[in-house]
Image (spheres, rainbow, N blue to C red):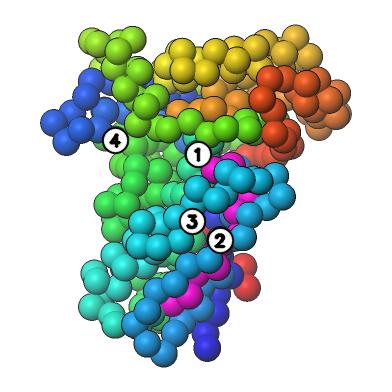
């Protein structure tokens, strides 16, 4: 059997500007994505028949949350390979073995990362030869974050986040990711956003944020991290405000809720700060883990 092991990164939104609700039920977005070297791994093995199976192995930090990951046709990685083989007119099957490290329901696109990995892996083991841009076009049907996670690095997302423009940035950045014990539903956060912001402005990318990335100005980057969904996440989970304050008091350059939350991400000056900040953040409300990671990282790719 042909097997590929694919690694796919988590993402954070350095800037997330949310606009009006569209006719298709999504919000218009303008966001700056960064891929992190925190990653899930998907082993994709070709089958002799047309079956698609999936198993999920949870990292220890995921605990019971990973139980919520579906292992049937609703799994996003399964939907990805079904979509690819339909588009390619292919009839083979695969076994998908997902190792979860990215927090589940944490606003870091763990399910989308698995879908991106499944697309890359199935394309490889089936010998389809699709280019990455063609996979990204297909990925837009799976979810707003999937196309970016195929590319990785830093990118601007528009539309509902699926239209990706690569961004040239300098250097690497250190982050501490605070994983919450309980997830937060993305639809519920957007519903709360609609309640709090019934007439949002047209979304935009802050030029100051882009200048900080081009100049590798870590302090300036911290000053311009922004997330329009943060007030909604804090409204639903008020304890997250305390998490953010603990990180800032301990010396983080900046802290934001990641995407729809409840994961909080802190930008740090250098790795020497990580141990002290980690100790402080472990004491924050509802903390399940603190992960030291870096970005930007590569998109979904075959590693074995």
Q: Which residue is mark 4?
A: 160
Q: Which residue is mark 2?
A: 56
Mark 1, other Cα within 10 Å: few <14 / some 14–19 / many ≥20: many
- The residue closer to the viewer here, 180 or 37, is 180
- Visible in this render: residue 208? no
Q: Which residue is mark 3?
A: 114
State which tag comes first along the sequence, 2 or 3.
2
Left or right side of 204 for 95: right
Q: Residue at x 62, y 60 (%)?
A: 57
Distance in Å between CA atoms under marks 2 and 3: 11 Å
Q: Which residues are magenta?
A: 94-104
Left or right side of 252 for 200: left
Please identify, in this view, whether the residue under mark 1 or under mark 3 is nearer the observer: 1
State which tag comes first along the sequence, 4 or 1.
1
Does residue 273 show up magenta in the picture? no
Residues at marks 1 and 3 touching, judged by CB atoms closer than 8 Å: no
State which tag comes first along the sequence, 4 or 3.
3
Q: Residue at x 52, y 18 (%)?
A: 237
Tell me residue 221's x, y (percent). Answer: 59, 20
State which tag comes first along the sequence, 2 or 1.
2
Q: Which residue is mark 1?
A: 105
Circle number at residue 87: none
Residue sticking out furthest to the left: 23
Please identify, in this view, whether the residue under mark 4 or under mark 3 is nearer the observer: 3
Does residue 102 show up magenta in the picture? yes
Please identify, in this view, whether the residue under mark 4 or under mark 2 is nearer the observer: 2
Tell me residue 209's x, y (percent). Answer: 50, 21
Distance in Å between CA atoms under marks 1 and 3: 13 Å
Does the magenta stretch mainly form a helix, a strand or a loop? strand
Distance in Å between CA atoms under marks 4 and 3: 19 Å
Residues at marks 2 and 1 touching, judged by CB atoms closer than 8 Å: no
């Amino acid at each position: 059997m042909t097997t590929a092991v694919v690694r796919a990164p988590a993402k954070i939104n350095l800037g997330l500007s949310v606009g009006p609700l569209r006719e298709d039920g999504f919000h218009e977005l303008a966001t700056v994505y960064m891929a992190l070297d925190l990653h899930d791994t998907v082993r994709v093995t070709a089958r002799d028949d047309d079956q698609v199976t999936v198993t999920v192995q949870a990292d220890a930090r995921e605990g019971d949350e990973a139980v919520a990951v579906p292992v049937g046709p609703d799994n996003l990685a399964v939907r990805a390979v079904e979509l690819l083989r339909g588009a390619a007119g292919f009839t083979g099957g695969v076994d998908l073995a997902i190792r979860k490290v990215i927090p589940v329901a944490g606003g870091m696109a763990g399910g989308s990362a698995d879908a991106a990995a499944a697309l890359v892996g199935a394309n490889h083991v089936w010998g389809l030869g699709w280019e990455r841009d063609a996979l990204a076009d297909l990925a837009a049907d799976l979810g707003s974050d999937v196309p970016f996670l195929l590319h990785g690095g830093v990118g601007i997302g528009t539309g509902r986040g699926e239209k990706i423009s690569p961004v040239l940035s300098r250097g690497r950045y250190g982050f501490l990711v605070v994983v919450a014990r309980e997830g937060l539903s993305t639809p519920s956060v957007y519903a709360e956003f609609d309640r709090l912001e019934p007439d949002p402005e047209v979304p935009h990318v802050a030029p100051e944020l882009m200048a900080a990335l081009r100049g590798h100005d870590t302090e300036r980057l911290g000053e311009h991290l922004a997330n329009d969904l943060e007030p909604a996440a804090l409204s639903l989970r008020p304890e997250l405000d305390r998490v953010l304050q603990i990180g800032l008091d301990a010396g983080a350059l900046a802290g934001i809720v990641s995407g729809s939350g409840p994961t909080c991400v802190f930008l740090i000056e250098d790795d020497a700060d990580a141990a002290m900040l980690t100790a402080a953040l472990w004491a924050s409300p509802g903390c399940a883990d603190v992960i030291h990671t870096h970005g930007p990282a590569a998109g979904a790719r075959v590693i074995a």
